[in-house]
Image: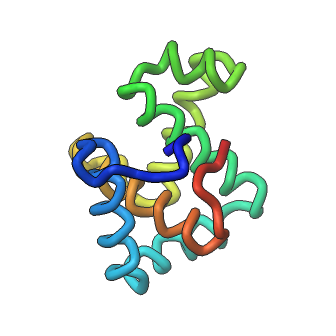
Amino acid sequence: SSSPFADIRDPENRCRFLLRRTADREDTFLDSYLQKLETAFSHEETETLLRTAEVYYKNSRSVAEAAEKLFIHKNTLQYRLKKLYGALDLTRWPDFRKEYLIRLLLERYKGKQGLRTLL
């Protein structure tokens, strides 16, 4: 959060805590997915794809709002997400499962990089 302290009673903080905790516990599983990305893309492209997904999910899966925040065209955002899902073989997964896995990957990636956010 933007404040120095995160109140666990805040639903957003509680959700982030649970995601981080799950990502830490499932490190081997998530690292296998991160390895797929690192094999398919450069470090910079992997980070761009993950940053795109992070902004997309933070904006309630609104393509228009996420694209505006990233200063890219809506089609570019959709292309990047499709590329990310394809590399991870998630294209046929239901939206909830895709989002959950990607959010866990984001937490694992940020934890490994020592980041709070990719923005």
Q: Residue at x 40, y 53 (%)?
A: 103
Determine whether, in the image, residue 97 is placed left or right of residue 119. left
Residue 113: which quarter of the image? bottom right
Please determine whether, in this image, residue 64 is positioned above or below residue 45.
above
Of the pair 59 and 44, the residue shown nearer to us: 59
Determine whether, in the image, residue 78 is placed left or right of residue 99. right
**Display coloring:** rainbow
Q: Residue at x 33, y 71 (%)?
A: 21
Quick one: which residue is furthest to the bottom in this view? 28
Of the pair 41 and 7, the residue shown nearer to us: 7
Q: Residue at x 26, y 40 (%)?
A: 95
Of the pair 76 and 64, the residue shown nearer to us: 64
Q: Where in the figure is residue 16, as x and y percent of width and height?
A: 35, 54
Please determine whether, in this image, residue 81 is positioned above or below residue 66.
below
Q: Residue at x 57, y 32 (%)?
A: 79
Q: Where in the figure is residue 112, as x and y percent of width and height?
A: 60, 74
Q: Where in the figure is residue 105, as x and y percent of width and height?
A: 45, 62
Q: Where in the figure is residue 12, as x and y percent of width and height?
A: 31, 42
